[in-house]
Image: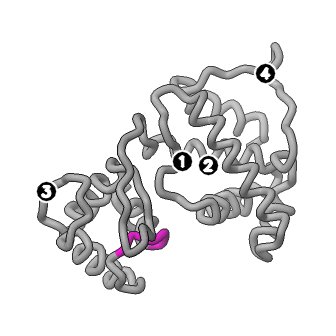
Amino acid sequence: MSLKAIAVGFIWAIAPFFALAGDETGAFAIKGAGAATCSKVIKSIDERDNISLAYGGWLEGYLTASNLHLKETFDLAPWQSTYLLLKVVESICTKKPDMNLQQAANKLIGELVNQRLVTGGKFVQIGDGATYVFQEEVIIRMKQALKDKGFYSGELNAQYDDATKAAVASFQKSIHDEETGLPGQKTLLYLFQESN
């Protein structure tokens, strides 16, 4: 499949959410790190070198602009760390090495759009010293996913109480993660990935 076909497919997939611009053919200039080839991105992420920080910063900016321009979108990646998002980009790049970072970021957005937060809300601090901070909706979704998997039977609210912490710890044990009871990136990745 050609890059043009991939781009057209992506455009049709997100067209209901996104007002597309560019010149009369839909082409536009890619600035900065977004023009980097997937092979360079993969190498940099694997080595965790300083250039990977530039890719991460570019990706954060691209997602922020997408949050601004996508309809019914507050946050495309409400719980994912920049490093986790780069690892997803790395996976996309490995499958399609002829792409650049901007094209891989578009595919990432296609994967994130169905789990985005449509509206903002209050933040909840979790853990000693506020180890984690999430929007209330993320906590509710977390509890729903735990309930769907049989780890939680309480109310679906934004309170991160002892029952929630115990449910998270039980889920962590099931995926061979450290049983902290706190929702780290591996925990949330497995929790939301399997439930979607």
Amino acid type for the residue under numbered disc 2: Leu
Q: Which residues are magenta?
A: 182-186
Residue 129 position within the rendered picture, expressed as x and y whole percent measured from the top left: 42, 72
Mark 3, secondary structure of its residue:
loop
Q: Quadrant of the C terminus?
A: bottom left
Q: CA distance from mark 3 to mark 4?
A: 47 Å
Examine the structure image and report whether residue 185 is included in the region drawn in magenta.
Answer: yes
| Discs 2, 1 touching: Cβ within 8 Å | yes
Q: Nearer the viewer, residue 61 or 26?
A: 61
Density class for disc 1 (Cα within 10 Å; few <14, some 14-19, many ≥20) is few
Q: Quadrant of the N terminus?
A: top right
SS for callout 2: helix
Q: Position of residue 183 (x, y in %)?
A: 39, 70
Q: Which residue is mark 2?
A: 108
Numbered label attached to residue 22: 4
Q: Nearer the viewer, mark 3 or mark 4?
A: 3
Please say whether residue 131 is one of the residues in the magenta stretch.
Answer: no
- Going by the numbered disc 1, the residue's amino acid type is Glu
User: Who comes first in sequence, dot 4 or dot 2?
Assistant: 4
The residue positioned 22% from the left and 61% from the top of the image is 148
Element assignment for label 4: loop
Q: Is residue 125 above or below residue 2?
A: below
Q: Which secondary structure is most common in the magenta stretch?
A: loop
Amino acid at circle 4: Gly
Residue tagged 1: 111
Disc 3 from disc 1: Cα separation = 29 Å
User: What is the crowding at mark 4: few (fewer than 14 residues within 10 Å), some, or many (at least 20)?
Assistant: few
Residue ID for mark 3: 155
The disc, 3 or 1, on the residue closer to the chain's N-terminal end is 1
Between the residue at mark 1 and the residue at mark 4, the CA separation in whole angstroms equals 23 Å
Q: Earlier in the sequence, mark 1 or mark 4?
A: 4
